Structures are given as C-alpha cells and as structure tokens.
Amino acid sequence: MTQDAQQLPGMISGGEPSATRKFDYTIIVWVVLFILLVILVANPIFQLFKESFFVSEDEAGGFTFQNYIDAFETDEYYKPMYITMMLAISVGSISLVVGAVMAWVVSRTDIPFPNLIRNGILASFVTPPFLGAIAWIFLAGQNEGWLNKWIRGLFGLSEEFYLFDIFTMKGVIFAMSLYTFPLVFIVVLAGLNNISSDVEDAANVAGGGTFHTMFSITLPLVAPSLFAGFILAALEAMILFGIPAVLSIPAGQHTMTTQLRAFMVSEDDLLGLASAYAMPMLVLAIGMVWTRGIVLGRRGYATVGGKGGQRRPQKLGVWRIPIFILCMIPLVCAIVLPGFALLTTSFMRNLGGGLVWANFTLWNYHFILTNDAVRVSIYNTILLAIMAATGATIVAAVSAFIAQRKLIKGHQYMGFMATAPIGIPGIVLAVGLFAAYTKQPFVLYGTLWIMFLAYLTKYLPLAYQTANAGLSSIHPELEESCRIMGANRLQVFKDVTVPLFKTAVIASWILVFMPSLRELSASVLLWTTNTKVISVVVVAFYEESLLGPISALGVLLLLITLVAIVAGFRLVGRDFMSSSG
Amino acid sequence: MAVLDLKGLLKIFGTDVRAVDEIDLHIEHGELISLLGPSGCGKTTTLRLVAGFIDPNAGEIVMDGEVVSNASSVIPPERRNMSMIFQSYAIWPHKTVSQNVGYGLKFRGITGAEADKRVKSLLSVVQMDHLGARYPSELSGGQQQRVALARALVVEPAVLLLDEPLSNLDANLREEMRFEIRRLHDEFNITSIYVTHDQAEAMVTSDRICVMNSGKIEQVGKPSDIYDIPATKFVAEFVGVTNSIPGKMSAPGLFEASDGAKFMMNSDGGKTGELVSIRPHRIQVHSENADVGGADSQNVLDGEVTRGYYFGSTVDYLVKVPGLEEPLRVIGDPHQFFGLGSKVRLTIEKAAVILVSDS
Amino acid sequence: MLKGIIAGLLAVALLSAPAFAADDATMRAAKKEGKITWYSSLTINIAQDICNRYNKKKTGIKCILHRDGSGKLYRRYLQERKGGIYVADVVHTSNLGHFLNLKAKKIITPYKPAGTDNFNEKFVTKDNYWTILRAGVLMPFYNTKKVSEKDAPKTYADFLDPKWKGKIIQSHPSYSGFVTNGMINIVNRFGWGYYEKLAKQKPKIVQSAAGSVPLIARGEALIGTGTTSYTLLKQMQKGEPLKPVIPPAGLALVTSPNSVFTKAPNPNAARVFTDYLFSQETMQLLADYFLYVGNPNVKYPKGLPALKDINLMAIGGDELKKKNKPTRAKFKKLFGV
C-alpha cells in the first residue's frame, strides 16, 4: 500500500513540517548541478562543435566547412574510419562468443574452480590494455616473440617461420578481444543469473542435452544481454586508444582514435579538423549506448522470468576438463603470459639477451625511479585517481540520494544528468575539453584540473550507477521506522542511512579509482609537463621503444592496481566489481 | 495511552489528487481500529499523516487534546511517542535482533541494564528470546515480523500504527500472526491503527473497522455491523460477497427491483437508497414447490439453478429469478444439492434485505 | 611586492640588453626563480642525465625536463602560448625550420651562451637566436646476429631488395625533426620514387628516431632505415648486436639548435641553465654519448667516426622550413600513418 502514495507526483517522503521549512534549497542544488553539467559536458561538446566549423590557426580563423571536407574526403583520413568499424565488429563478435560461453559455463555448469575463472576475468578487466599489448610484442613478435621461438624450437623450424605476428590487424583484434570480452561476461552473467534454471530443467526433461539446451533455450533467453554485451565490446574497441597506438601504428594503420591524436599532436594547428573528425565517433558512440539502453530497458539488466529461483548446474560430463582448459586460455593470454613477460623483461639488461642470470639487471627500475617524468607521473596518477574517485563518488552519492529519496523537485532528472556523459568517448571528450579550456577566460590546460574534469566526466556514470544500485536496496521504510522510534533526521542518517549506504559508496569509489589509475585515451591529449600520468609516460616511452623501462613501469602500475583491488575486497567483499551495470 | 481525533483531514498530492478527502475519525483510548480499503483509497496516506511523515493541507490531528498536525505546523514523527510496523518489516539489516528492539529506548532515556531487561522481556513476549544475537538476514519472514512487533512495543508507545504488517507473509503465517497481533493488543492495550486491504484480517484484529474509498470514509463500525448492515454499496461489496439489487422503495418496507421483483424489508428507519444488499448465506434454498410458509413474514422467490459449485462445507449457487436482471448468488447447505437446471424456491428474511446508498 | 617589481625590471633589462653570458646578478635572480623547464627532443636518457647532473650540483635551480619529439614540442608550445600559458624556458629540438618560424614571430630571444667563443663556426649563429647544442647523422643500421656483414645493405638502394620485405623499421617524420631532415636529404638525392618503393617493403613504423634501435637489437626487425647516430653507437657500446651502414651516397647531418624563450617564466634561470648546457662539462658528456658538439676541446669516444671522414648531406633551415609539411603529408600518403 505504500506504493500508491509513492507514485504520486510531488510527494515528499518524510517531508519536513512546513513550519520549519524556511528556505527552498531546491534551487541551490539545481544551480550547482546545472553549472557542473555545463562545465563537464555541455561546454566541451559545444566547443568541439564550434571548432569543427572554424579555421584553426595559431591566430584566429574564420567560419568554414573545410574541416569536414578534409576529414571525410581525404583517403588517408577515411580509411581509419573503415578500419575502426571493422575492428569494432570483429572484436565485438569475438568478445561476444568468448564472454557469453564463459558466463554460461560459470553460471550454469559444474565446471571445476568457477571462482578461479570469475576472478581471472575480473583481473583481465582491470589490466591496462596498453600494457597487455606491449607484453604481447614480447610474446608474439614475428621474429623474436617467445611463442614463435618456442614453436620453432619445438618443431626445428627455420628462422623464417613464424606463427604469430602481433603487428597486424589480426594481432590488434586479438589483443583488444582479450581485454573487452570481460564486458560481455559481466553483462551476460547478470542476465543468466536472472533466469530460473527451471526453464533448462524443462528442456532437459523434454530430452535436450546440456549443449542443446544452452544453444536452444538459455542463450536465446538472454538475447538482450548478449546484444548489450556485443554493443559494449564493440564500443570499447572503437574508443580504445592504447592498443592501436601500440600495435597498429607500427603496422602502418591508424584507427580513428590514433588518427585523432595524430591531429592533436601534429606541429600544425589541426584542432578544427580533429573536432570534425571526432563527430562521427561521438554520434556513433551515443547511438550505441542509446540502443543498448533500449534493448536492456532502463534498469541496465535483462530481467527474465522474475526471481532467480533454485539453480541446478548442468552436467558437462566428459567435457568438464576440456572446457575448463578452454576457459583458461583467454585468461592465460590476458593475464598470466603478459604478466610474466613484463616481469621478466623488467629485469633484463639486453632485450635480446634472454632469460639468463648474466642478463639480470635492476637498471630498468633504477631508470624509472630516477626519471623526473616517472616520478611526477606516479604522484599525479595517484593524486588524480583519488580526486576523481572522491569527486565522482560525492556527486554520484548526492545525486542518487536526492533521486531516490525524491528530496527536491525534478528529482527524476537527476539520474539523467549524472549519466549524461555515458556515451562520450574519452578521447572525444578530451578534444572537447581541450577546445573549451585552453583559451581565455577559462584556461585549465596545463593543470591537473582539466584532467580531473575529464576523469570526473568519464567515470561519473559508473559511480552513479553503483551508488544508485546500492541506495535503491535501502528501503525508505528502514529510515522511517528509525524516525518513528524517536530519532531525528540527523540520527537516522547516522544510524541507518550511512551504515547501509557505506558499502555502495566504497564500491563506487574503488570502481572509479581503478580505471583512473590507467586512464589513457583522455590523458594522452591533455597532459603537459607537470601533469603527466603513468599511462602517458608508458606511451611516450613506447614511442622511443624503451621496452625495459616500460616493463618496469608496467609492473609498478599493476602492483598499485593490485593493492586497490585487495583493499576493495577487504572493505566491500568480493562482489564489488560486478555490483554495477 | 491516547485518544486520537482526525478532524477534516485533507491531503492533496500534486495539484488535484485528493488522497485523503476531509475525513473525520475519533479513536478511543486502547482501541484497535482498522483502515480497510482497496489500493489507492487513502488509508496508508491517513496512517502516514497520523505518524507525521506527511503534513496535511487542511484539518487537524489531535492527540489527547493536543494538536499534533495541522496545515501550518506538524510535530515531527520522532516526537509523537508512536510506534509503527511497516509492510517491509523495516528491520535494520546491520543491527542484531536485540539492537533492533532496543534502539528506540535510548531516546526515552532508558539505557544499560534496564534497557536489556525490557528488550529481553519483549523478545520473550514475541517468543524470540533465544534469537537476540542473530542478524535479520538469518531470520525467516515471520520472525522478522515478530522482531518488528517487539521493537514497536518495547518503547510503550501511546499509539501503535500498523501498515499492512502481514502482506509479505505466506497464508498460514498470516493467519497465525493475525491472532498474535490481537493477543498482543489485548495484553498491552495500546491505541492502534491498522491499515489493511484484507477484510478477514480487519475482522479478526479490530475493535472497529473504518472502510475507506477514494479518500473518503464509507463507514465506521464494529466488524459485525460493517458486515451485516453495510451503509453503502461499496462497503457491502468490498467486505464479503453480496447480491446488489438496483431499484427503488415503492412503499414503506417494500423495495421494487428495476426488473420488477419485490422485496419486503424491515422498517427502513427513513433511510433512502436505490440498492438493496442481500448476503448469499442469508438466502435459503428449498426444493421446487416446497412448503416454506409465511409469505408475509419473509420473501419467497422461485428460480432456476444456473450454476452450482460444491465446496464440501457449502454449495455456491447462481439462481436465475424472474424479475431480477442478475442471477442471485446463494450459499446453500451441501446435504441437499440441486443440480444444474433444477427449479428451486428461495426464502429471504426481511432482516437480511439491507437498503444501501449507491455511492 | 617590491621584490617582484625589481625582478620584473631586471628581466626587462635582460631581455632588452644585448645577449651576453650570465653574470652574478643574473645568477642571484635565477636562484630566486629556483627552476627552469627545458623542452627538449634530445633522447630521454641523455636529456635526463643532463638534468640530473645539474640538479646534483644544488645550484638552487631545479632543472625540469619535458622530453618529446620536435614536432610535438613545437605544437605544444604554440598551443600553450595561445592559451596564455608559459611553462617552458629553454627549447631544444632537431627542426631548424621551426626555429626560423619562432625567430620570425620573436617567440625566441637572442642569447649567447658563455664559453662558445671558440666554437666551430657551424655551431654558432651571428644573431645568437640559437646555438647548435649537438649534431648527429641519420644512420641506417642492422642486427649483426641475424644479418651477416656480407648480406647487410651497403647502399640506400639495398633497402629496396625484396628479401627485406617486412623486416625493416622506418621512423615516422611527423614527430621527429631528425627523421624529417634526413628524409628531405634523401629525397633531394634520389627523388620520391625511393620512398614509394620503400613503402612497398611494408616497414614497421615507429614514432621516434631512436625507437627503431631497441626493436632491431631485439631482432624483432633486421634492418633500420635510419636512426640517430648517437643512439645507435651508444647501444653498440653497451654490447647490443648492431652495426651502422655507411652508404657511399652519404649521411644526412642534423644540427639541433637550442634557444631561450622570449616569454620564459624563469628568464634568468633559463640563461644560467643554457650556459650549463654549453659548458665544457656538458659538451664532454654529449661527446661521450657519441654526439658531435661545437666545442673543439672535447674528447670523442672510440667508435664515433670523425665528421670529416663522412660524406655529409645537409640542408639549410629555409629549405627545411619549406619542405617540412609537404614531406610529412607525402609520407602519410605512402606509409598510411
């Protein structure tokens, strides 16, 4: 019976008596949020749009369509778009198959060590993709890649022979898929967990075997999740900068993100061209997020058939061990091999010297720890990650609280505002921020603030979804019952709201902190001398082929991430990384 | 220990949704009154107005002579010395059973050994004394409900508010908890308001029932009055099953249905209305042409069975009667079963025909 | 406040005064500024070494290094200037053409570093807008473990042999002034046809002049079309299996200027630091790193061929300025990135 009251518009739950409500604070909250949204989203996108119609020169230029003509008529600029689409579709499809099958295996079968697989996938999810790509150069370089050498040795093949060549489009697709399939896994797992296994039991009773049931019953039921997973993976492949920067530029192939960055770092002023070039990416990305939203519905989850119900694992029989080994392959490729490659390379004196004691050195670590750029970047990375995590969590927690508790007029638009930046690719956002805040009167370029804005904008939707999910699990009656027992608003907040909301807040903080540690696509356009972060230093080192120091830096970054994850597990419990849609 | 008066209470949501539409209600000290009605009738809003969670647009709530709510000032919930039981139990998941129950005591200056003693004694009243150290997630739904009851009662509130407390329980448990709530009320004798949409629950637990519809009070009375002498068509149909027959009073003590059938009834006391309500179990079924006698002291009607369901303890018939548009629903004795198409004779006491207003 | 005004006046006086080496007054003002930011395209380990050595001296001035490719540094400075941000004090890249632009717009200011009077005349300028900090040649090279001396390329044309297809590394000119410079020289000599054929060899593209060295040392590719001589020779000294190719047609000489920015936020420290760059100590350090310097008194390490022994190709700043952009555009057309 409470719901009939709650659905009515304008209702103020637990409303303060009118006599004591002296000032309408609605207006302040709205003004603050409005200004924030203008700074974070509206102004950068507007400036991006504006710049795309102006001649960019170091002195001011006039209105023109030339940027669009250049961007879409020149073959060299047009080809990266085609390549990017090809990448998105290939990576999306591969991730879909790998992610969906592994989700099914973990959720529905009697596979051994399901938690090992789950945690392995989450680990590949937090591994910086650009580090994975660099490690794969050591593993699958055409001539000296360890895997190629190993196969040559195994079969006594000639120096000319190679099985893998990472510097190809296939290599790029492979490396991207390794780090995007977890997105599909997480979405499909959530979908699967919402279906009762009764439907599968019914299929078994009707005579369907384990695999037949999976293909004819289970997977079709989670079709919305599959589609959403594909969209997410394809979108990620489209907006990823690190892997193509590492692997496809040497292969003589730009993607849209690397081409965009090439415009931005060209010695000519190509801001207008870059802005025009960013437009199709922006439109496509928003379109994809929008489509995903429609398919999944507003909750971000596919709900099928109500409650999860009892779960009876499907028997894999003789396939149990082979499937387990098959599931371990992507994990070994995504974490174990790259981790091993980076760790060993970081201790090598000569890169061609092999794994022998005479080739051992600490020089790479000495180099990075005495390098100005690295020292500044470690400090900046951690500071920025803390700032972004704290900022995004505060904004997200306050907006989610207002939205859920219907505290002010227009609370229903809170969620929209906090998740508005969701479709904007990081690198496009960075071009917009660059256009907006490198000129008077708001010069933020050259400060950590512009990167803070980029991170905040990029991760606010994630923080909001996490905080909102956490808050929606706190029934308002839990607070009202506290009230009627004699506690005032402050005591209710202290005794009930905070303890119950705490977990979601910590989870949201860590979920922003971790990707902030490795943020690259926005940082790579916004960094300056004093505002380097680890990820851009890795890319800068890579461009000079300083592979040893990169490995050491990579090991360092992985260690910091590991500490954050362990802290997360301790504070929130194991599920914190899958708690958001 | 309190007397409550709701006077002209009005609550408008948005611009024109009159969720509670100028109701008046007097609740005696120690009385348990139910607010009964369908979803959206305003019963929960009324309860939340009494609790102080929302403020009225007009009217006032008076508790022991003191105005606790009116349009210009509202005493906040925590200063009303009330307790409330929620539909979702609202047991705090991060506190143990004992901590949940004892929470309200600190605001009443009761701490230490005295608080422990009260918590223990209340837990034993609700038969939960062995589970004080448990967390709510380790309890069943019924146990959580008992914790909610203990938590509400331990502070010895002046008024106890119950918002559909049993709607999340399964059927067996719900029946058991009805009696439990009535037992606790008899033991503690706290002025209580009980919101429910389940008429059986209201019947079992309440001293008086207040039937609400569309923000207005339809009827207030003892459970038996509500059932036997419904004031309106809505009450007659919402509380139990009934035959509603449209028509008009053609003479004092005589009601004529729209299609011509006539019903004698007891003195109407000057009531007006365009409907009579006849409960199905107040109609007796006899075989065709049976000698029922006294056609002037009771209504006698002949008809044909168009449906008969056997329930073991009763038979549920529909009987088509000439002069009535709708067939009459009749609850009959299973020892004498009439098959489909049987001609039957029905008798209805004058007192069973109740004139109701068609609102 | 008064201090600020005095420092400001001093700075103005310095800026308008003829360019002379820093004196005691400058030194005091520089210490007050406390730091200097150096935009440098010199490869990172050498540039960082210079800064670290300077910082170890505890002069009260901290050297902050910002290392990037010539093109990126140029764009970054202009972009920052557009936004009214002035971070950099001293600039050093391998694109003389850019320095001509900077001079034309008075973005750099004349300064004659101390101790450069006796320098090789090719390393100093009359107007002192810049002084050449170091010079090098763009050297083709190969991996000696994978390629025998007999098979190794001897001429530029040998790089077009089909047997090298997919085994070559070419550095991208967009970010490296060194590479752009070398390319213009080779195009002058052989025409664009040379690069059209080279593109068909599908070389791997790296984004800096030095980037090819570790990859070829590792054996990931076998031959490189050209890297900075100092990087190559230093790695050879460290024992990497590499060897230069010195084609009879000659090698492109690249001279890399160093200037002080007109709007340097730390004008005095900029001058003090520039003096340090051209000091005997740093000159010898650069020589030890296999770089050619203007100071005639340094000792060059074993393995560095004397400039007079090499057939040198060279272009002037004006030509570089003119051909810079078309060369990069043509490269993108041919090589795809």
Image: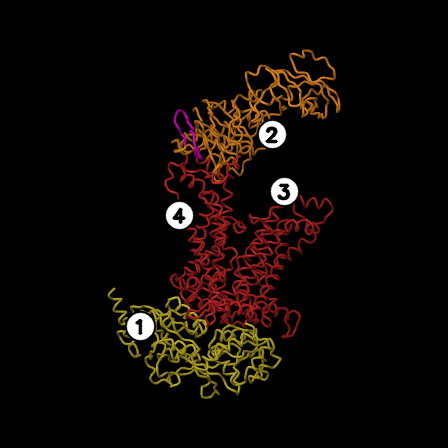
Q: Secondary structure at mark 4?
A: helix
Q: Is residue B106 visible?
A: no
Image mark for residue C268: 1
Image mark for residue B85: none
Q: Position of residue C292 (x, y in %)?
A: 42, 82
3 or 1: mark nearer the eye: 1
Q: Position of residue A275 (x, y in %)?
A: 49, 65
Q: Type of residue at label 4?
A: Ile
Q: Chain of mark 2?
A: B
Chain B shown in which color?
Answer: orange
Spatial CA span between label 2 and label 1: 90 Å
* 10 Å crowding of disc 4: few (<14), some (14-19), many (20+): few
Q: Secondary structure at mark 3?
A: loop
* 10 Å crowding of disc 1: few (<14), some (14-19), many (20+): many
Q: Which residues are magenta?
A: B52-70
Tell me the residue that label 4 is attached to: A28
Q: Is residue B274 visible?
A: yes
Spatial CA span between label 2 and label 3: 23 Å
Spatial CA span between label 4 and label 1: 49 Å
Chain C shown in which color?
Answer: yellow
Image mark for residue A310: 3
Chain A shown in which color?
Answer: red
Q: Type of residue at label 2?
A: Asn
**Callouts 4 and 2 on one subunit:** no
Foreground pick, A226 / C56: A226
Foreground pick, B341 / C160: B341
Q: Residue furthest front?
A: B250
* 10 Å crowding of disc 2: few (<14), some (14-19), many (20+): few
- Which mark is first along the chain, 3 or 4? 4
| A327 on left or right of B188 | right
**Callouts 4 and 1 on one subunit:** no
